[in-house]
Image: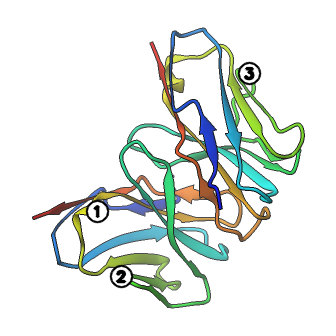
Amino acid sequence: GEDVEQSLFLSVREGDSSVINCTYTDSSSTYLYWYKQEPGAGLQLLTYIFSNMDMKQDQRLTVLLNKKDKHLSLRIADTQTGDSAIYFCAEGDYKLSFGAGTTVTVRA
Amino acid sequence: EAGVAQSPRYKIIEKRQSVAFWCNPISGHATLYWYQQILGQGPKLLIQFQNNGVVDDSQLPKDRFSAERLKGVDSTLKIQPAKLEDSAVYLCASSFTGSNQPQHFGDGTRLSIL
């Protein structure tokens, strides 16, 4: 989606934190979403944040939202090998616009 | 609760043939979506249903793609005739209502056109 941009690749050492960044264009979206896609699987909803919030924490996941800069990030603490996947950021109230996805590779 | 079910998981056909995909949404979800995900890209919406009515099909190539949700539950997406550029994963998603609700995705149907 040309409306949502993400970096394509991220390599992280097991146990470190991962930070995936996203910029979006539609400031009217009520929620912004993070999805995870493992090989051969569909998209798993990881977390989402209400547009009036700055931060949301859910166990190892922290979402930060900067509405002024239209910047969204996902931090994964203590990254594990099972976190290797493609992560998509998405915006939209019904028709979701997705970024191209960030491939996260966790190395031992 | 059971997730979004899709079948088949994989399909290989030759160009100009026809193909159909089936989706069963999460029980109670009124809104159903079909997305196309081309390799290396994020999903793009093809069509959205609210119960058995079409809300948005502006991105559906209507000369070859069709979709229906006759009883407001299951849905089928058909391509006839298929082109090489239709090779993609077709994802079905559902949400409780049509707006401001998280969408939950099935595992998709991977279509290869020879």
Q: Is residue B38 above or below residue A53?
A: above
> Disc 2 or disc 3, which is closer to the eye?
2
Residue type for callout 1:
Gly
Chain under label 1? A
Where is residue B47? Give x, y as percent. Answer: 73, 43
Q: Is residue A76 above or below residue B26?
A: below
Chain under label 2? A
Where is residue B28? Give x, y as percent. Answer: 80, 59
Cα distance, mark 3 to mark 1?
42 Å
The residue under label 3 is: B63
The residue under label 2 is: A60
Are the numbered discs 2 and 3 placed on the same chain, yes or no? no
Label number found at residue A51: none
Answer whether labels 1 and 2 touch (C-beta < 8 Å): no
The residue under label 1 is: A82
Which residue appears at 46% of the width and 57% of the height?
Answer: A99
Which residue appears at 62% of the width and 54% of the height?
Answer: B3
Disc 2 packing (10 Å; few <14; some 14–19; many ≥20) = few
Q: Nearer the viewer, residue B42 or B104?
A: B104
Q: What number of labels is visible?
A: 3
In the image, is B39 to the left or to the right of B47?
left
Cα distance, mark 2 to mark 3?
46 Å
